[in-house]
Amino acid sequence: MTTSVTLIPDSKSRSVSGSVMRTRKKWSRLFGLSALTVAISACQSVPLADTSPTVARPNIPLNPGENYELYGNNQVPSSLAAVRWQSFYSDPKLKALIQMGLDNNKDVKQAVLAIQKAQAQYRITDSNDAPNLGLNGDYSYGASNARDRNPSDSFNVGLGMAAYELDFWGKVASLKDQALQNYLSTTAARDTAQVSLIANIAKSYVNLSYQQKQLELAISTLQTREESLRITQARLAAGIDSKAPSLQAAASAETARIAALNAQSGVLRAKNALKFLVGTQISEDMMPDPAIPSITSSQVLSAGLPSDLLRYRPDVLQAEYNLKAAGANIDVARAAYYPSISLTGNLGYSSSDLSDLFKSSAGSWSFGPSIRLPLFDAGQRDANYEVAQIERDQAVANYESTVEAAFKEVNDVLADRATLDARTQAEYRLQENYQGLFDISEARFKAQVDDYLAVLDAQRSLFSTQQSILNLEQERLNNQIELYQVLGGGANLGAVAVPTPKYQNLVNVLDNKTNKQKAVNAVEASKGPRIVTAQEAYLLEQQKPVKVVEQKQATPVDINNDNNTDAYISVVETTTEPADSKVVQP
């Protein structure tokens, strides 16, 4: 590969001292050195810039309207994730607890601190485009050679500029882009933590409510069964019944007592979980009522279109930003193949006598560029470039996996929702049947037609059905919470504070970009990869060269000296074949 690069010095540079001809001669020497360095770099194998778009191929449905027959119309409403949590949840106590959690929860605080750290890291990267100035002073004592018997002192003090890199190859710009994507990734991680926290608080609130109702049901059932035990023991004492009904009634009463104790423990655990999520103490008036019927608004619940899921899920956005950061890292690794051009300078005083250091005659200055290009690094740059490419491929795979997991979670919630109402109605009908059976058994017992065992059996069945109904009602509310969560609801829907660069490299100083243009560029950089159809992805992949990685066996090794080969020292070879060598599918 040959690369032609031309460096043009600034024609308006002023000579501080000396003649114009001497200055031109110095610039010509600098230009010759630069051209020589770039020519040497052109002889190296610099990877071609990969300008093809990043293709993600998650196994997801791309046809609008799929899996939306639950809503009973042909028009799919807007995504539920577009509704803010303040509007989605209608219970005032729950809304207050969610806000308390967002203000006090430690996970959210850690996510916010991560954003602040990423902001500071971006400012550090941006400062690489600004010259680094500092005061310097030094003293030395010595001779120019070994035969010099008159060593001398040397004093220097001044204002110096450290090596300032001219970003001809985009290395610093790519580092900025990488820092920007890392910052955006942390904002998405904060949104993910917020979505999870809101859902967990809502679930804990519902769980506490229905644990309280389970406790009320268990206590009520225990009282009923203790009364049944009293009746059977009285009939046993009177010789009317055998001992079996009394033993059965005692077992039923103990079962109800165990259920009450379990429910009491469940209430305490639910309170602890809610307090932990909220991150502060909760007053009793903030506790939910038993078996709350609803916590959300009465709006129609919709999953929206598949594209909405990719837009609102913060974990998907985080995977996108990580993919963009990996792409920027490839550009950083590629820029390492080109020479590094830096500027250094110093303005101050230099003298051999400390008393004469600050006299006007002691003034000194220096300014000049330096060019560095490693000629041999044992393949380190090649390996770094390959690592950057592999990390990009890993980011693509992670993005695809994240998208697939997001769609699976939504489909699972919708699958539960599809049968939830039918299961709940069936349990209510079953409760009516067992209630009728209990009433009949009790009437037949009072009429001395049946013994008390039939009444006890109907009580057990009725209690179990009532518990199942409470579980299904809790599941119904949890399903609404989960649907809102898996769609990305509860994330920060406001505009992201995208940082813009404060400094510009000298090679780009003439761009004169306004703040609006900087913001536009930053927002464009924050956009993730495009999801394409399978046919588009196939055509794009056909245009890419084929990379073949082959591991060849080289030298056999006998480790334990038994005249048998125990291992091979292998060599990994990577070759690239042109795109037309692919087998094109018909």
Image (tube, rainbow, N blue to C red):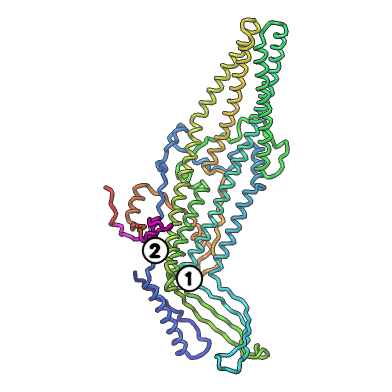
Q: Is residue 561 magenta?
A: yes
Q: What count of labels does the image hold?
A: 2
Amino acid beneath label 2: Ala
Numbered badge on residue 49: 2
Q: Is residue 273 above or below residue 185?
A: above
Magenta extent: 554-579
Of callouts 1 and 2, the N-terminal one? 2
**Residue 51 in sight:** no
**Residue 144 in sight:** yes
Q: Is residue 573 above or below residue 251?
A: below
Q: Is residue 42 above or below residue 481?
A: below
Q: Is residue 157 magenta?
A: no
Residue drawn at 57 percent across, 94 percent down = 148
Residue drawn at 53 percent across, 75 percent down = 163
Q: Residues within 10 Å of mark 1 (few under 14, many from 20)?
A: many
* Image position, residue 162 (x, y; %): 56, 76
**Which secondary structure lies at badge 1?**
loop
Residue tagged 1: 167
**Which secondary structure lies at badge 2?**
loop
Query: Which image quadrant: the N terminus?
Result: bottom left
